[in-house]
Amino acid sequence: MADKQGKARGGREQGAEPNEPGLTRERIAATAVVMLDANGLNGLTMRGLAEALGSGVMSLYWHVQNKDDVFDLALDTVLEYRGPTALQDWRGDIVHVLEDWRATMLRHPWSASLLPRRALGPNILVRLERLSKCLAAGGVADGEVNAAIWSLWNYVMGATVTRASFGPSNEDRAASQQRLAELGALYPSIERSRLLLDDDWDGTFRRGLDFLLDGIAPKR
Amino acid sequence: MADKQGKARGGREQGAEPNEPGLTRERIAATAVVMLDANGLNGLTMRGLAEALGSGVMSLYWHVQNKDDVFDLALDTVLEYRGPTALQDWRGDIVHVLEDWRATMLRHPWSASLLPRRALGPNILVRLERLSKCLAAGGVADGEVNAAIWSLWNYVMGATVTRASFGPSNEDRAASQQRLAELGALYPSIERSRLLLDDDWDGTFRRGLDFLLDGIAPKR
DNA sequence: GGCAAGACTCGTACGGTGTACGAATTCATT
DNA sequence: AATGAATTCGTACACCGTACGAGTCTTGCC
């Protein structure tokens, strides 16, 4: 049996197969993201991941501590922030940071429900750092910056988690609204306003954000 | 046949054991809540649940569609709202509804991360209905009520989910803050403001809520 | 050359999970 | 006593994360 790969240099690292250039944390993270995007949080299994990477299952554990580690990796991979670094309009910058954050998570809906229960990775900290700078530049008092950051965090997380889990299936919401109607007079107000059918997600997000920023902005 | 002694509750065991009066959805829900409170989201298994109920595992499936159904049941059980029905101060009422909602979820931390990914049960709809009425009473325009409700929902959900998963372990946050310091100049602002050590959760929640309500309140 | 010491891969196995299936039991009526 | 419906539950299956240790490859030193 002849060896299938070039003998001269790295046996597996340089092999004739450009498909499997050896396991790395980066490759694992990237593949995990693909699988999560495709099948959601439950769509990621170590066996599946190994298969997609063309490796044995247990080989993963050399590069990765456990499955949660893979989650952290995928999460931070997805949250990388590339944005303008120039500060100009503090409020506009904040809106931009938060809308980009939300959009990023919605592009990978699993990330929204994952973020709150995992540790804070480097890339999310970059976003928080940037937020902090914007607020300071806007004249928010030192003692208030943290409260402001957390308020914004809360709002973005809630909006995104909700959007990510309710949003996709209009069908479900229609069914819920239908049930509402059937239950007659139990929920008259939200039945009448068709609360569960409202789907201007971006609009309400932006609106509520403005409310929040109005409150946070230094009074004069 | 002996007198039925008013059992009629379908007990297959003689009334000697008051412990296991037969399986019902209510009993399953209550026991599930206990197990979730004790060991978190992963602490609930069908086998464990059956054992706690003194029944066979598969017996559960007569009363329950699947495990997600158990989650829905437990969630709605926990979210029951008992509050004053009298409307007086609309803004105070809203704050009360939301703080009660948050406190309820924090009493059962698993519920916070569960709510966004499950369907809306009757009891959470009761809270939304009440919210809707308060806003209308406060003079919020019809076309704005839905946006206001969702903004408040987003905020409460974000705050509670975050609190429920970050909150318990001050240790982790201290460790994170420590890592921040080690990373030197990468995150100067949030390192200096000790963002990750801030733990006045109730205060920031209330503060941000006021911001939001300021924005929502009808302008004049 | 030989050879030892990491770095890395991976087959097997174990104890756990949710639940499909169908047989067994108990109940309410006759 | 008999019947049919309601309810219980033992067994089995496929799948999961990962502990363990035996393999293989790469590198550096003689």
Image (cartoon, coloured by chain):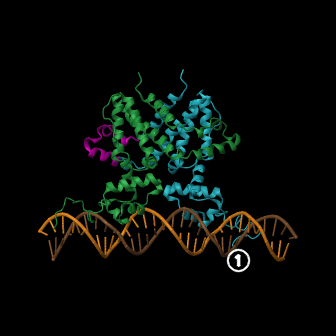
Chain colours: A cyan, B green, C orange, D brown
Quadrant hosting residue A190: top left
**In what element is the residue under mark 1?**
loop
Which chain's residue wears label 1? A
Q: Which residues are magenta?
A: A174-199
Residue A158 counted in the magenta span: no
Along the horizontal axis of the image, is A107 left or right of C22? right
Q: Amino acid at mark 1?
A: Ala
Which secondary structure type mostly characterizes the magenta part of the structure?
helix
Residue A149: image x %, image y %?
56, 36
Q: In this figure, which residue is indicated by the disc labeled 1?
A: A2
Q: Residue at x 70, y 39 (%)?
A: B185
Q: Is residue A82 above or below residue B42?
A: above
Q: How many marks?
A: 1
Mark 1 surroundings within 10 Å by alpha-carbon count, few (fewer than 14), some (14 through 19), many (20 or more): few
Position in image of residue A29 (x %, y %): 60, 55
Residue located at (41% from left, 27% from top): B217
Residue C24 versus residue A50 in the image, above or below: below
